[in-house]
Image: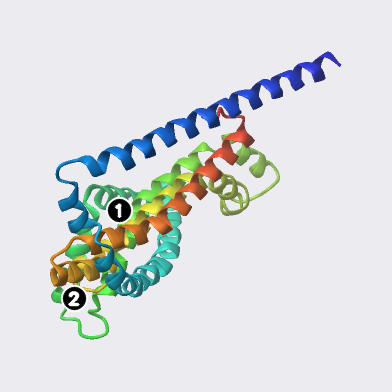
């Protein structure tokens, strides 16, 4: 009974601390918002900033066009995200190969991650998007900048996600492999049925953060010429001589990245609860 009572007191204490944290966060947020609303319009250059970046008429005129252009970003994301996941798993498995016979495969995985993590994504997109079609003399539809921009994004992000997956694989205790061998499972069966499921559970939150970054970096494909949301904002900015279209594009990106970020935070918190980790309140 004493243990139950102590547990109850602990839960009550945690609830009080949580309520205090929420109240403090709410109060500080209200103070910050009020300060912004009251003080920012009093700044001497605010009117110029408002007309250049927050023109309601320009936003209303350009926002539908920005939304239509954003559909291309979503399409690129729709096929690059699965491609990144598949390629990153293959690279992670190659890097984790233990057999001496598979050393060349492991070397390829190391070179792949070193190269594509070391070169900026925008440079990868430029080199592949302009270089590959020009080098091989490709014609339509094989010189499509959307195609090669998607390939560049896939290669670049697969290098990062592969390292996340590899860390998850290496985080699975060796006893799990030993237990699988003791019941006659092969290395492939052990990896597929024992190691990878556990690795994925521990790496879902950081992978979600990588895919949030991928969603933003899809806009880098605009350097190759496709009229997606960032290029459309640039066109509209030149048309109106106003920066509000860029703010509209930022709003569109935030409408997708914020929910995805909150989902990643939720998955991380759930993982911490399952593993007994301390959560920050």
Disc 1 to disc 2, C-alpha distance:
21 Å
> Left or right: 158 with respect to 176?
left
Q: Secondary structure at mark 1?
A: helix
User: Which quadrant is home to the N terminus?
Assistant: top right
Q: From the viewer's perspective, is residue 80 above or below residue 190?
A: below
**Can I make out residue 51 in this image?**
yes
Rendered image quadrant of residue 20: top right
Q: Position of residue 175 (x, y in %)?
A: 61, 34
Name the side, left or right, on which 130 lies relative to 24: left
* Residue ID for mark 2: 133
Looking at the image, residue 89 lies above or below residue 34: below
Mark 2 Cα shell of 10 Å, populated few (<14), some (14-19), many (≥20): some
Label 1 or label 2, whichever comes before in sequence order? 1
Q: Which residue was labeled with disc 1?
A: 112
Which element type, helix, strand or loop, lies under badge 2? helix
From the top left corner, tell me how far across and down residue 46 is, in percent: 19, 47
């Amino acid at each position: 009974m004493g243990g139950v009572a102590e547990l109850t007191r602990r839960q009550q204490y945690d609830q009080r601390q949580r309520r205090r944290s929420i109240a403090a966060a709410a109060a500080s947020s209200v103070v910050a918002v009020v300060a912004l609303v009251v003080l920012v319009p009093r700044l001497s250059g605010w009117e110029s900033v408002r007309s250049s970046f927050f023109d309601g008429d320009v936003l209303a005129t350009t926002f539908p066009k920005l939304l239509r252009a954003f559909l291309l970003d979503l399409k690129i994301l729709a096929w690059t995200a699965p491609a990144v996941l598949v390629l990153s798993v293959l690279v992670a498995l190659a890097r984790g190969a233990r057999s001496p016979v598979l050393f060349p495969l492991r070397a390829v995985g190391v070179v792949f991650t070193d190269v594509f993590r070391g070169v900026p994504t925008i440079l990868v997109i430029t080199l592949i998007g302009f270089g590959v079609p020009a080098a091989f003399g490709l014609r339509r539809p094989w010189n499509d900048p959307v195609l090669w921009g998607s390939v560049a994004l896939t290669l670049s992000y697969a290098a990062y996600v592969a390292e996340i997956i590899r860390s998850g694989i290496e985080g699975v205790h060796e006893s799990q492999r030993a237990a699988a061998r003791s019941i006659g499972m092969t290395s492939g069966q052990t990896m597929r049925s024992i190691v990878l499921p556990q690795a994925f559970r521990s790496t879902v939150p950081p992978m979600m953060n990588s895919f949030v970054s991928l969603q933003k970096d899809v806009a880098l494909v605009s350097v190759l010429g496709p009229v997606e949301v960032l290029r459309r904002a640039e066109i509209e900015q030149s048309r109106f001589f106003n920066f509000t279209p860029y703010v509209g594009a930022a709003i569109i990106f935030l409408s997708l990245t914020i929910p995805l970020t909150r989902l990643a935070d939720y998955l991380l918190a759930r993982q911490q609860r399952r593993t007994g980790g301390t959560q920050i309140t």
